[in-house]
Image: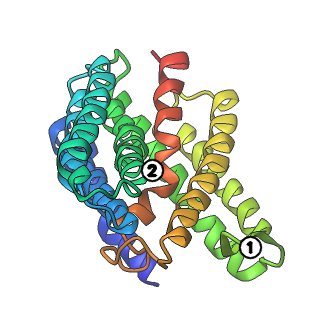
């Protein structure tokens, strides 16, 4: 029930910002969520150096907002240099180098995993197209496919789940739940086509929904793997019924680049 109530409160705010406001309003919400998710990742990793990772992540999100994707490589390169310099001049004085490599790798990976993948959500919102409201349509499609898949998997798994999907990573997930989630993904894409997104052809909508469904499941399992490595049940406690922001972003992060490049190939 907490999951349903959270969705009832959160989704109208999200869609209002997406359809009624200027891009900056939705981008602000998305950026806040992504940065909070990165903060939760760093808390899971139990590593210091949070400031430089958060600054680099904010810069990556700004690059997506201003449609200067070429800046992202420079930002990541700068983060690598800064991390190595901090390790050289601040941490090396303790004569203990054992944590240097994993620490630098963990902080850089956090920016890649959460901010760079999640930043494509912002890239979609600032799309400039001749198709009316294309950015809003794409992101509405994105969220309803992800939420329908999560809901279908959750309730199908609870009522019909028998065969474990990945018991060592996420014991609660079942094959039946995954199939129910994929069905939810496809139904959501078809509803989008027949209601608000006629430009999305069915021949594209169904494969897109299936790809997003599989990547959503994979992203969920990967985040569960990270939590198991950190010996944590949830990434945080911010969202009732879902855990933290990272727990909500897990099935979105792998899918955001997919939807952006789907636009580049089929709707540009």
Residue at figure coordinates x 26%, y 19% from the top left: 68
Within-10-Å neighbours for mark 2: few <14, some 14–19, many 20+? some
Which picture quadrant has residue 121?
top left
- Residue 235 place in picture, x, y as percent: 40, 70
**Does 191 sit above or below residue 131?**
below
Q: CA distance from mark 2 to mark 1?
A: 27 Å
Towards the viewer: 112 or 139: 112
Q: Is residue 164 left or right of residue 8?
A: right
Mark 2 near mark 1, Cβ–Cβ under 8 Å? no
Residue at the (17%, 52%) spot, across then down: 51
| Residue occupying image coordinates x 31% and y 17% | 70
Q: Is residue 62 visible?
A: yes
Kindly identify which numbered label has been placed on residue 79: none
Work out whether residue 220 or residue 4 is closer to the camera in this orientation and state it.
220
Q: How many marks?
A: 2
**Which residue corresponds to mark 2?**
143
Dot 2 or dot 1: first in sequence order is 2
The residue sitting at 52% across, 60% down in the picture is: 223
What x and y, as percent, mark residue 47?
32, 62
Quadrant housing the C terminus: top left
Pointer 1 local density, CA inside 10 Å: few below 14, some 14–19, many at least 20: few
From this view, report whether residue 75 is shown above or below residue 221: above
Residue 162, image x and y in percent? 83, 78
Name the residue that disc number 1 marks.
167
Query: SS at mark 1?
Result: loop
Question: In the image shown, does 13 or 248 lie closer to the viewer?
Answer: 248
């Amino acid at each position: 029930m907490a999951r349903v109530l959270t969705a009832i409160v959160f989704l109208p705010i999200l869609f209002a910002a997406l359809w009624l406001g200027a891009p900056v309003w939705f981008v602000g919400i998305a950026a806040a969520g992504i940065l909070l998710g990165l903060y939760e990742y760093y808390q899971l990793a139990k590593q210091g150096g949070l400031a430089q990772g958060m600054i680099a992540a904010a810069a990556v999100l700004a690059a997506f907002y201003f449609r200067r994707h070429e800046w992202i490589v420079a930002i990541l390169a700068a983060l690598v240099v800064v991390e190595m310099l901090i390790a050289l001049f601040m941490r090396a004085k303790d004569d203990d180098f054992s944590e240097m490599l994993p620490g630098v790798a963990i902080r850089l990976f956090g920016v890649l995993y959460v901010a760079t993948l999640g930043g494509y959500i912002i890239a979609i919102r600032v799309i400039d197209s001749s198709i009316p409201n294309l950015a809003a349509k794409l992101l509405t499609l994105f969220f309803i496919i992800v939420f329908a898949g999560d809901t279908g998997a959750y309730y199908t798994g609870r009522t019909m789940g028998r065969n474990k999907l990945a018991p060592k990573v996420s014991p609660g997930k079942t094959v039946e739940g995954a199939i129910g989630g994929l069905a939810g993904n496809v139904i959501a894409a078809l509803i989008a086509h027949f209601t608000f997104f006629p430009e999305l052809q069915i021949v594209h909508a169904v494969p897109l929904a299936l790809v997003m469904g599989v990547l959503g499941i994979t992203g969920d399992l990967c985040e569960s793997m990270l939590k198991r490595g950190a010996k944590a049940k949830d990434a945080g406690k911010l969202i009732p019924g879902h855990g933290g922001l990272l727990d909500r972003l897990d099935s979105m992060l792998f899918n955001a680049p997919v939807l952006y490049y789907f636009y580049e190939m089929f709707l540009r």
